[in-house]
Amino acid sequence: MKPKAKNLILDLLLARDGEALSAKECIAACALFGIRDNNVRVALVRLSAEGLIEASERGSYVLSAAAHELADEVATWRRAEQRVRDWQGGYLVVHCGALGRSNRAALRQRERALKMLGFRELEWGLFLRPDNLGDGVAGVRERLRKLGLQGEASVFAAADFDAERSARIRKLWDGKALNASYRKLTAQLESWMARAGTLDAEVAARESFLLGGKAIREIVYDPLLPAPFVDIEARRAFVETVHRFDACGKAIWRASHGIAFKSETAAQSARAH
């Protein structure tokens, strides 16, 4: 599957951790995926018009301040397991019932914010997740606001749901599917790294981008549930494997295209934009 030029450029800029990326580097990277020069230039113009990138000097670009809000949240994938704590049985709740739905852009931002932090809708306008995030209510509220949740939404902790609602809450997440995904992707990443040295440089760069992007997307949107919702050891093993894959991917891109990444892989935005 060929990535879109806009997504690929944003991924590369995220990977630079604040350093500029030249149009020439963008074109060279996109060429790996069969994206034409003109399409890259059009994507750069559109990203600039959307306020996601800005020129740092002639022919070079950096992420805009607006794009950094989302980029900062995406970058937390590396600390995913450090951002959870033991679950005491309570929940974090967001009430959006009074918010409008006519503004499509605001609605998309709200839905993305809630999804990225693992919230699911229990009843109309009432979203919740287990209260096992180390940020606590105040920290989660701030993260949601930065990701686009309107200030009018209520964010609070709750417990002692009745038996009927407690049963429905447990069905909001498919723990079996999450566990299967952890194990499947861990195996795919391990298998790829074992044969990476036998691949052509351009094939390795292209495949590491696509597979790395898929893996990091899974972490970015993982609800980080506690036991007994999921097998937390399987998740930890998966995250650790993605860390090693990330280092492998960075080395491949640096060796094959001379694009140095300071802290993240070229796939780290995980299509979250």
Image: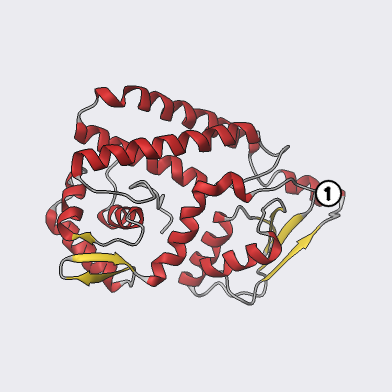
Q: Identify the residue at image location x=79%, y=60%.
A: 158
Side of 234 where 248 appears, left or right: left
Image height check: is 179 above or below 224?
above
In this view, 96 is above or below 261: below
Question: Which one is nearer the viewer's eye here, 62 or 117?
Answer: 62
Q: Quadrant of residue 203?
A: top left
The relative height of residue 228 versus residue 264 in the rendered view (above or below) is above
Q: Is residue 195 above or below residue 168?
A: above
Position of residue 194 measured from the top left corner of the image (x, y, whole percent)? 36, 22
Q: Outermost residue, bottom direction?
A: 152
Assign the C terminus to one quadrant of the image.
bottom left
Q: Which residue is mark 1?
A: 164
Q: Quadrant of residue 14?
A: bottom left
Amino acid at the residue labelled 1:
Glu
Residue plotted at (46% across, 54% down): 75
Q: Nearer the viewer, residue 24 or 254?
A: 254
Disc 1 crowd rating (10 Å Cα; few below 14, some 14-19, many 20+) is few
SS for dot 1: helix
